Image (tube, rainbow, N blue to C red):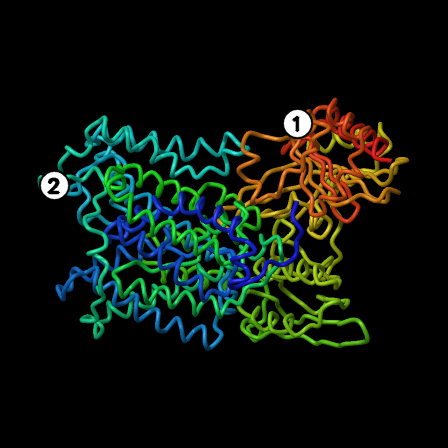
Amino acid sequence: MKSLDIPKDGLEGLKQNWSADSLSGFLVFLLALPLSLGIAKASGFPAAMGVLTAMVGGMVVSLFAGSRLTIKGPAAGLITVCAGAVTDFGALNMGDAVALTCGAIVVMAVIQFFFGVLKFGSYSDFFPISAVHGMLAAIGFLIFAKQLPILLGVDASLTKGLDPIHLYTHIPIFIANANLKITAIGILSLIIIFGLPMLGGIFKKIPAPMVVLVIAIPLSIALGLGDILSQEGKPFALVHIADFWKGVKFNASFAAIGTGVFWKYVVMFLFVNSLESLLTVKAIDGLDPYKRVSDYNKDLRALSIGNGVSGLLGGLPMISEVARSSANVNNGGRTRWANFFHGLFLFLAMLVLIPVINLIPNSALAAMLIAVAYRLAAPKEFVNAFKVGSEQLVIFCVTIVVTVGEDLLLGVGAGILTKFVFHIINGAPIGSLFKAKYEITEQGNSYDIKIKDSAIFSNFLGYKKLWNSLKPGKQVNFNFSDTKLVDHSFMEQLHHFEEKYHEAGGHVTLVGLEKFNPFSKHPLAARKYTSTKLEVADVKLSPRQVELREFASANGYEFYPQKIKSSAKYSGFPIEKGNKIMYEENLLTKYLSIGKVEVSDITLTEGARQEKTETHITILQLSEHSITIPDFALEPEGMWSKLFEAVEGKDIDFSAYPEFSKKYYLRGANEGAMAPFFKESLIHFLENRESIHVECHNNRLLFFKEKDTLLPVDISYVERFAEEFMQHAK
């Protein structure tokens, strides 16, 4: 485990972190190369322009960026806008449609730069979460509709002129006209993409798109995909990149700048590009193990530079891309140089790998984009929206329907309008829809803030300005007794504020929310004031909770089934590196001779936004003991441990105990403190027990058997393990 000293920036950061950043950059490159090719083709651009965009996003934008861990490049979220622009500009007959689209991208970049100068970065918080998620889900439906015929090897003549609705209604026709060889590679690619992460462990770190290429390219040769022709007599089954470097030239046309179509796409590019990027930067900041806060406006300006350069050279618009950024965090990237290295490896690939790239089946790229579409519009997105509240599901679905049926801006507008209707129905005063109303009193070491009327997405910017003005390290008391409505967007933003303020040494309390009626059981659900005191409903225990309650009663534990916030409790432990632990539930506590024991089920979230996955783990935390223990992380050693030493930290081996060193991967910031603590008795104990994960931070210990919830018998085993561990550590 490495020290959490903040990594240096600039050239000093390159010298300090080059090994971790170059490894992460390489792993992200393996993910970015095929996705960039596929996104460009789906957008109506030459495939190589997707790689050019990612190269600029890495090698240019990283030099100016205001975020440390985000990866810049072309994104699936802009496919529908780009493809629509190419189609509509083509209908104008004013020149090359791709060049006209690039002209709109360049103009967008200029406006985006001034947005950064004017500090518009914070305005992304205005948009309600459910509408944004609905927009992304709609994009997922659109991508799937356009990529399915490509995966099936359907001739382009069968899809020409079809809108998204008709693409869905023609699916039986596409299946009937599928090319079996192309379809076989497409389906195999889908199996790899969805199946590889299910294997768990190190397989979750391997970029599935690159595995697809390793298998699909030899298959394309064996099946003779290059000989399959379209009805026009042209090869269409494989990617085709001619002379990439001759194609990199000034390729932006402004001939259509006087048309409404041109400015329509400038606005759409600006809206989606800026919003998606800012939301991703914010989400990735939440995964940063060093708790750094990005400069949103600086990052917006850097992004505009990248968009301008890319557009001028014929490339696509770029954003802070969530899948690649999440992978960068998980792979141990530390500074902006990881993004630079990802671009550098793409540059090198275009020098030496073009003959190989030309053997990539288009159906394999379509499978990758269908997987992205699934993540954007997965059933869990609908379930999550419903869990927060039925009104959130309505807003989510309205945004999807209008976006798919009309266009993206109208869809988001419809979602926002629906949200306003719900707020007015639920009693939000008209005068508070856009104005934050509050009273603040500062007394000594505390702030008392009385929230008035409503706290909702559309007036949140006023509250954000208030929060930014609060000095760190104080007691902040929010009083909601004069509030009528608090929406989900505000509750989520308040949760993030609490977390960051606690990390800065302060404390936050909420008063008055107990008289609100939440719209669902979700802890961040919208809630409406009720004049009558709410009756506390009996907690209906799940079968697991009943089992744990019986176990607690039989083993001297106090049992608390409620879900509670716990982000500060696990802060700094290695398990949270690149992950988030927002809540814990089913808490069992008791005191033993070794100290205070707490067992709970935690939800570990990996990745961000639509890339977020959840893992439920039963964990034992030991505190209030009498032994001084150095910070360390101990886990079963795997075949890939050595590869990731540059990311996770050096494996500390003891030459006198080869069996222990072979069995466990031990790391710690203070290597000199390891040998005195891991004495012979403790090492022999660990050698002769089933491997288990043990972590120590600030003299508190975590024990967990595996990344899963545990049965009572396994909880008893972990408890005994902890007791014996401490006895041998004395």
Q: Quadrant of the N terminus?
A: top right
Instruction: Tell me, for residue 130, which label it has, or none.
Output: none
Residue nearest the viewer, comparing 693 with 177:
693
Label 1 sits on a secondary structure element that is helix
Residue identifier under label 1: 663
Residue 404, placed above or below residue 159: below
In the rendered image, residue 83, in percent from the top left (x then y), is placed at 26, 55
Q: Quadrant of residue 307?
A: bottom left
174 relative to 403, above or below: above
Q: Position of residue 673 (x, y in %)?
A: 77, 43
Q: Position of residue 576 (x, y in %)?
A: 64, 46
Q: Residue, x 70% and y 34% (percent of image)?
A: 704
Left/right of residue 90 with respect to residue 109 in the rendered view: left
- Element carrying mark 2: loop
Using the image as rendered, state which of residue 170 and residue 215 is in the foreground.
215
Q: Horizontal placement of 683 versus 664: left or right? A: right
Find disc 2 in the rendering and name its residue. 234
Which quadrant of the figure has residue 113?
A: bottom left
| Residue 623 percent across, percent down from the top left | 82, 43
Q: Residues within 10 Å of mark 1 (few under 14, many from 20)?
A: some
- Seen from the viewer's position, the closer of residues 128 and 118 is 118
Task: Find the distance from the CA under tag 1 to the CA under tag 2.
Answer: 57 Å
